[in-house]
Image (cartoon, coloured by chain):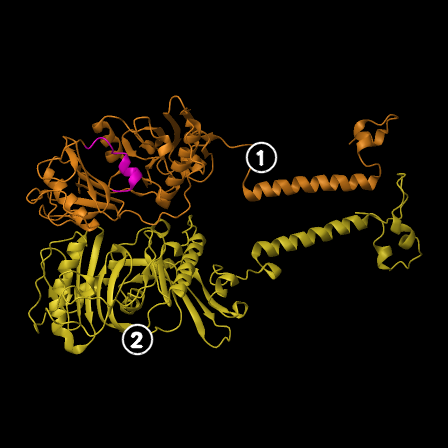
Amino acid sequence: MSDMNEAPAEPGWLRRTLPHSRRGRLVLISALVLVLAGTGLGTWAADTWPWPNDRYCWGAWEEDSGPGFLGDEAFGDDDDGSRTGRETAPTRERPTGSCEVAIASDYKSSYDGDKVTTDQKVSVEYGPVPKAAEARLAMVQDGFLGGDMVPLPDGLPGTVNGRGGLLVLPKSCDTQDGRPTVVTMHASGTYTSGPSYTKNDPADLGGARQAAVLLVAAANRAMTAAGCAPDEPLRVSSPLYDLPGKQERHFSPSDDVCGIRGLRLGTADTEDQIGAVTRDLQTCSVRGNRDGVPYLNLAMVAQPRLAAVFDGIAGERPAARGWRGTGTLGKEHAIVRADCAGRPVIFLMGLSTDPGHLAVFANAAAARLGCAPIAPKGADR
Amino acid sequence: MSSTADEPNRSEQPPPAERELLGQRRLHWWHWRRLLRGRIRPLLAASLAGMLLGAGGMAWQTQAGPFAPDEVCWGALSRDDLAARFREPDDVKAVEAPVLDGGQSMDGPTGSCQLTNSDGDAWALTARVHRLDDRKGDDGQWADEFLSARLTPLGGGLLGMASDNRAWLALPDGCLGRPSDFDGPTVVDIARGSWISDMEPRTEERDWMARVVVKLVNKVSADLGCTGTIADPVERLPKAARYTHTEKPDALCGIKGLTLGKKRKPAHYPMITDGHGPVRTCDRDITGSQPEERLMTVEDPRLAAIFTRMALHEGDQVSSAVGYGSLGSNLGIFRVRCQTGETVFLVQINKGEMSADLRTLFPRYVETEAARLGCGPLKLNLPRPGGGR
């Protein structure tokens, strides 16, 4: 404002626009200062900054928006760790896509001075479930129907835990041949300290409910890009009401696992975990108590959209003589689809090749749902 | 800021209208108008405005003065919420203990809130936040009242129930974590008045209780820093439970095959939990806070945890290939792991002369209910009658 004192003969536009009285200018300047101070204070108080944060996964996730992997805490003690995004959006013509957020940091541990390196990743895949039965079961059952998964909140068809989840999209996103499209999310990572110590250290999604929010946000963006979004975007509003049960140890090989009479692996020192047990979904996994080696994965799926994921891969004939419905007993996975309490229900088994295990599980689950046994007498002993 | 300052004005603006009226008179030096002359006036005005704004903002922020919230019970219930059940909702007063984390005691969050009726001469509603647990042994009465067949499960996978004078709902696992095997869940429960004896619950009042308990849980969760809002459950609730008048002697409590003998029929009609939920209770002759007879299956493992001590210590030991339990003179209880996790079966007969019936009913009840849950077959071996431990 130095031109105020020079008083040029021809007042410039600034001079003309500014108030002519000293008091007027004083008021204007005070006002400006106040506005700036106010904005600054507001910015500081609300912890926002006028420059936009980076966004990832088709714009669905924003830097510093809550979950650890999107904030500075992802970098540990590293002041210049890197977070990089990579993405391919689905389109109407090519309805598959993926996105990934990778976090890398290295720093000297403030605890023991060792060099620490972390590499973490959150990846999202959008696309129809694979055509081939084995590939589909490997992806959906092995990945997202273990005993550590719970149903998504608000009745959304899918499952979630603190490390990822699966969401089955509405029918509008199905392929021509009727396969549902799913969005999956998976957090992974490693932590290396010093020359020899390495452990699993998946990216921090901020808990299972936050994971559900992230998954649904990415799904909404991807559906919009693929041109199959429903009128109302999908939404998570409820809390995550149930978490998986605690691991239950079994010392004797003749202990019942998964709370089912007669379901025995004949192996000592195992532990099981019951995830969901509702009329829509049931999951239970058994693994070695010491080595964590997985022994058995069981699931019952009745939620219509989640069950639709298994359409067309349960074969045309009964799984074995005397079984209800249709099914196949494969090397890695077994699947049976049968009507139960008025709707088609899918029974799944992974890891074990013993049809007896599936028979005991399916009959117990069927009894709980109030329908006729799936496997014939004798198959379950 | 239209000013009436007297200093020479370099601008050619026409003087404001009020200048002629007020500004030009001679005033004593101490007159407020003279004191406020000149540049000091806009500054004063600005600072006054700032102070007002600041104070207002502060009051709003801290919810003081005119911004004090009119909500009661930890800020969860508005006067409108109360209007449905209180004649003069504006006169309702609350005595509250805030919801504080148990901290050192490891007891989880606790708090309470009591509301008076319009006359202010009686407590009309008591709300509590507390963890159900087995260690203090006072949850027997809680179970008597809050797991009664009068209560309808809230449905939608919620661990909670409601009747016209009792309601409870557990805080989400996602908020406090899943309770351990020996701790019950942390719940919000509400009670209105004393336990009404034999009346059937009224649906409309039950709905209000259900709505209120959900509001309380949502507010308490939010205050504990948890995200997510449980939706109003009322739409999906069935009519409040009624006494069943169609019970058959070979299907007591509506359970096929459960019988005391071909001809024997209990003197009172049963009331049975309506709808799928954490418990299935069949009560008879509900007088006071205890039913004369109760057959109950606790299907939710989190809730089953509060019966652990009872199953271990109350009476003589019941043996079975799996699970454990005990049988006393008026209580039989059995605990076993089913598909949903730990499950408790309980038969309680509070009339002395019926202990023979208890011995008959208890194993049959456990075995048939286990079958219904896909938890069978079970075979219970009872201790010898009159035999000590």
Kindly report the secondary structure that dominates the magenta region of the rendered protein.
Answer: loop
**In this image, B21 relative to B255: left or right?**
right
Total numbered labels: 2
Q: What distance separates the C-alpha of mark 2 from that of mark 1? A: 64 Å
Q: Is residue A137 above or below residue B99?
A: above
**The N terminus of chain A lies in quadrant:** top right
Within-10-Å neighbours for mark 1: few <14, some 14–19, many 20+: few
Counting from the top left corner in percent of width and height, residue A106 is at 39, 29
The one nearer the camera, A109 or A98, is A98
- For the residue marked with disc 1, what is the amino acid? Pro
**In this image, A63 relative to B358: left or right?**
right
Question: Which chain is indicated by disc 2?
Answer: B
Q: Is residue A333 above or below residue A250?
A: above
| Residue topped by disc 2 | B288
- For the residue marked with disc 2, what is the amino acid? Gly
Residue A303 falls within the magenta-colored stretch? yes
The one nearer the camera, B5 or B187, is B187
Question: Which chain is indicated by disc 1?
Answer: A
Res B74 visible: yes
Q: Which chain is yellow?
A: B
Colour applied to chain A? orange
- Residues at discs 2 and 1 in contact (Cβ within 8 Å): no
Residue A170 falls within the magenta-colored stretch? no
